[in-house]
Image (cartoon, grey):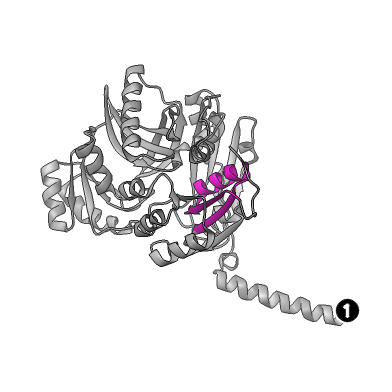
Amino acid sequence: MQFTTPLKHNSTKFLLLGSGELGKEVAIEAQRLGIEVVAVDRYPHAPAHQVAHRSYVIDMKDKAQVLEVILRERPTYILPEIEAINIDALFEAERLGFHVIPNAEAVNKTMNRKNIRKFAAEELGLKTSAYRFVSSFEELEAAAKELGFPCVIKPVMSSSGHGQSIAKSPEDLAKSWEIAKEARGDASELIVEEFVNFDYEITLLTARNEKETVFCEPIGHIQKDGDYIFSWQPMEMKKEVKKKAQKVAKTITDGLGGRGIFGVELFIKGDEVYFSEVSPRPHDTGMVTMITQTQSEFALHVRAVLGLPLGFRQITGGASAAYKAKSESFNPVFEVDPEIFGKDSFLRIFGKPESHEGRRMAVVLTMGETQKALERAKELVEKISDADYSDAMQSSPEAVQAQEAQQCGFFKKLLKIFQ
């Protein structure tokens, strides 16, 4: 394979549609191979914007805006990194000859829980929890009564647990209905799932380059309100159950096709493997692979997109702990105990320009025997806190800009005096 130089007429170019912390790592890995990176998101100074060659801020649900950037940049590969993207723009891009990763239909299926659940359960025959789709509160009540309590309620389109809840009784349904409106996407339809009392859940990172498929060691994780807070690798599993999980992961990724890494989420109950969800991109729980594997999930994603060999090995056990902001700020500042910077522990601050309560802002990574690494990660993440700044430091971007302009005017006057 030939490799190019960025910012040339013949550069290999990645267009990232979504520029969060996962996209940032993809951008870094791509640039290590001389790939030109263009990062797109809905807000300025997103994490991947800060390391890309160029960046754009657009409404990614607007077909015209998405296509305008694609046609302007003419990328070699288009990498959707979030769910909230106009799917018609991706289908149109494919029709025009652009290469969408893994492909537009796979993105279409996975960005919508209704599409992927029906595809996995009804077309591929994978074992899943019982489910119903509802569009009204009355339908929600009927579905919950049929499936029983507790039941899991999610918007068909969302991410990072936004809009997800568990209803433990009929009295919880009204609250779940309201929570669903917090979706990052479309909350007009919900999926109601039977609650599987599983033993544990895993992410099985599965990379394919259309020539071979490889599996990372299973990643165990703990979620709260549908969003990950801790993950560890490897997750101990019976050999035969791991083989079942790999078979499920290969079935769903073969069905979706294309290139790239897929985060396949599975429930394990005894020796049974239940398919839950799949993301056709790096997975947040997979950030732990930045220290546990010779090739992280981000490096494997880039290799798979380029059609390169997918060889790698596990080098250590490890764990990750997400740090979530506890306050609102336009100027996030964190107090970090130096203990975090040990010989077997690492801190990655994402550089998001604003913090909101519960927003993921950083991750702690620890190496070592899995259980000890997890305990250490849990301990260290508690040594980060939001800095207690005054109200003046929490000014809006507009106020900060006005303040900077005022200071600039002052220095110009000062310069004239000295001149």
Q: Is residue 59 left or right of residue 376?
A: left
List x then y, in percent, for residue 29.
58, 42
Q: Examine the structure image and report whether residue 154 is included in the region drawn in magenta.
A: no
Magenta region: 11-40
User: Residue 257 location in percent, x, y?
Assistant: 36, 39
Q: Which residue lies under the disc numbered 1?
A: 418
Q: Residue at x 75, y 78 (%)?
A: 410
Instruction: Name the residue nearer the viewer: 373 or 2.
Output: 2
x%, y% of residue 62? 39, 65
Q: Is residue 40 above or below residue 268?
A: below
Residue 369, above or below 101: above
Q: Quadrant of the N terminus?
A: top right
Nearest the camera: 10 or 165? 10
Asked if residue 37 is among those painted magenta in the image, a careful observer would answer: yes
- Report the amino acid beneath label 1: Phe
Position of residue 72 relative to residue 341, above or below, is: below
Locate the C terminus and report the quarter of the image it occupies: bottom right
Residue at position x 54%, y 63% in the image: 330
Q: Is residue 80 visible?
A: no
Of all residues, the one furthest to the top in this rendering is 239
SS for dot 1: helix
Locate residue 273 relative to residue 204 in the image: left or right. left
Q: Is 164 on the left or on the right of 411, as rendered?
A: left
Res. 86 image quadrant: bottom left
- Assess disc 1: are there few (<14), some (14-19) or many (≥20) residues with their C-alpha within 10 Å of its C-alpha: few
From what the image shows, is residue 358 above or below residue 264?
below
Q: Position of residue 159 (x, y in %)?
A: 37, 50
